[in-house]
Amino acid sequence: MAGNDIKLQNISNFFKDPIKESDGSLLGYKVSEEDAGKLNDLLIKLNERKKNLKEAQRLANIGHWELDLVHHSLYWSDEVYRIFGLEPQEFGATYESFLKHIHPDDHDLVNNAYMNSVADKSSYRIVHRVLTKQNELKYVEERCIHKLDDNGNVVRSIGTVHDITKTVIYEKELELASNVFKYSTDAIVITDAENKIVSVNNAYEKLTQYSAHEVLGKDPKILSSGWGDKEFYQTMWKGIVEDGFWQSEIWDRKKDGTLYAAFQSIVAVRDKENKIVNYIAISHDITEMKNREKTIQQLAFYDFLTKLPNRKLFEQEVESFIKSSHYSNKTFAMLFLDLDNFKWVNDSLGHRFGDKVLVEVSKKISSAISQDCIAARLGGDEFVILAPYEKSLSISQLASKIIEDVRVPLVVEGKEINVGWSIGISLFPENATSYTLLMQNADTAMYAAKAKGKNNFKFFADEMNKSAKERLLIDTRLRYATSSAAFTLNYQPKYSCIEKQIKGLEALIRWQDPVLGFVPPDKFIPIAEESGYIYDIGLWVIKEALRALKVIHSINPSLTMAINVSGKQLENSDFYEDVVAIVRESAIATEKIEFEITETAIMENIQSVVPILQKIKEFGIKISIDDFGTGYSSMAYLKKLPLDSLKIDRAFIMDLEKDEEDRAIVQAILALSNALNLTTIAEGVEKIEHKEILEEMGCNIYQGYLYSKPLDLNALLEFMS
């Protein structure tokens, strides 16, 4: 208080004349008008002091508390409530309630400190954490002293709570910065505004061979190698001063005179007045990296795994051949090689094993070609060969030799591996006169070879280019189709040979494009699989087929719906969950749903397909192999698959009445199906002779134009009724 403030008196001095009831109970006190005025002034002054105390506590982030051990009451100042993130009405003012707001890990620390101080009648000071109602973590410093009665017992505890969160965080940041500086593997040097070294870290001493006491107070230019010219340093300092930051590769010199390369960053540190107070330079030693660059340059044109030329060098060699052909009339072939079944090797045996397979096949390529040929690896399992020739027959012989060389299983780490080559060939100058077109045409021919059945070669033809453009157009139009109602479904009945009635239906997708017109499924489905559109298309088919089945069940509730599922759909990790959601939303019983998957799709990725098929089967959906007999099923795998039926491909049905080999194959499939207790479905039944032969052989169900062509939903309902 200021010196001219009135002196505060004991309030009890004003209450000396009590007023009592007849029974002696206290009604109040008589106070003179003069004393009343003094008391009022005193109370005003007390309120001002209380207000000033609160403001002082708020500014200092310090609150105080008092614990009355006699009356078991706890008082908190407003600042304590603020620190704890509480309103007074939210807090039951007891010691136990107070402990609830202490961080759980500090609960015992606080409680033991207080209890021990009470027992010892001593003060204490501790730092602990607080968790506010808003789950905010704070650090506080708590101090406490005790008031004793005449007998020396603690009757009141008085303490302060100081919010030191910002201080603790700042100290931790300083400690972190100190550790970064101390333990960084990059050399760090700090200079003052005059660019005199004030501090260096251990990495700096190790890199430059200078100790800290040798460089403190000196200019960092003592390390200069003379590598940078005057213009370089002018640019450097301009960047530091104007932008506050600069970085580049530099060469400096160690204490023993040897050069080292570093990637250096320099930062200008400014104070609140925007004046530069320090420079911090961080240098990362790249000497070893720079020394390796020469070796890397030598390896830049060769594949690290097979040691064959890479794509870049191969392109240069082809361009060189093309240029020299202008005056030498050279002709050459470009062979594009893609390894068949290599994905299975990687998926089944791992990429490390796959790399060893690539090394072995690259050796076979190198041994198959002559010295005037150039073989290169483009990446993955793709290789190319530049082969000069006089007669195209010699190129055919070379391609045949490469294919024959891998017919004998490769032996890698004691395992026999069966792979093959699909080879596409483009000729210079017949097919193209530029590297890009030659490569593109050879790639197109390679895909044609794969489509032909793999493990063979094919020369590029104009028809292939036409086919490639058509595929590109279909791919482009598919993008629009997947975002519009361009697809429809037809439904083809399946007839039971035993029950002599419709047993089920197969949903067949149809695409009528405004630009392309009607596009058959066998044309757009493979492209949709390659482009990734098949997943969304497939989910739409399932939803639409189940919607139609609900309508169909109003006429015949016993019918099942077969839906074709692509192998690419099965590879999607979300497929099972999406199917479950669609089926549950449709409210169709799972036993009325059947998924048809082609034999080839299953066998190409058998390891990952079996688990997802088992989950689908456990959910209640039936599983059928479509186009059975056209793939390469292993009997061992066939037994493990969770199948309900086999569908005989139409290729074995169309000449059934006149081809003995087809009849033998169908009979064998039926025998296998019966042995595995599976239902057999024959597709493509178009003649009465087909039906009679199949019934005689014991086929369960047939499907084809003999009974009904695929129908849209309205036509199907009319047909059924």
Image (cartoon, rainbow, N blue to C red):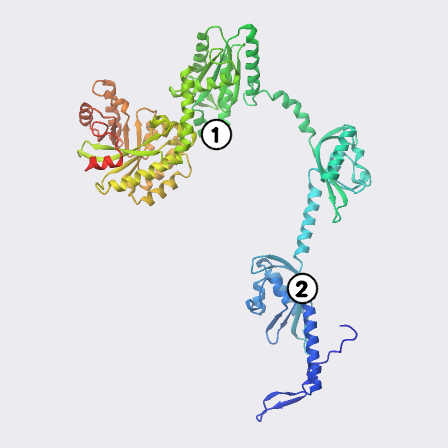
Name the side, left or right, on which 101 lies relative to 60. Answer: left
Instruction: Determine the secondary structure under disc 1.
Output: loop
> In this orientation, does residue 225 appear?
no
Q: Is residue 144 above or below residue 551?
A: below
Kindly identify the residue that appears in the image at 68 percent across and 65 percent down: 57
Residue 61 versus residue 540: which sits nearer the camera?
A: 540
Foreground residue among 577 and 528: 528
Q: Quadrant of residue 463?
A: top left
User: Residue 227 lies in what quarter of the image?
Assistant: top right
In the image, farthest residue toward the bottom: 22
Left or right relative to 412: residue 611? left
User: In this rendering, does residue 547 appear at all?
Assistant: yes
Residue beneath label 2, please?
A: 58
Q: Mark 1 vs mark 2: which is more N-terminal?
A: 2
Q: Which amino acid does the dot numbered 2 rest on?
A: Arg
Q: Residues within 10 Å of mark 1 (few under 14, many from 20)?
A: few
Residue at x 26% of width, y 38% of height: 560
Disc 1 designates what residue?
A: 350
Return the residue nearer the eye: 218 or 493.
Answer: 493
Give the amino acid at mark 1.
Answer: Gly
- On the image, which quarter does residue 63 sit in? bottom right
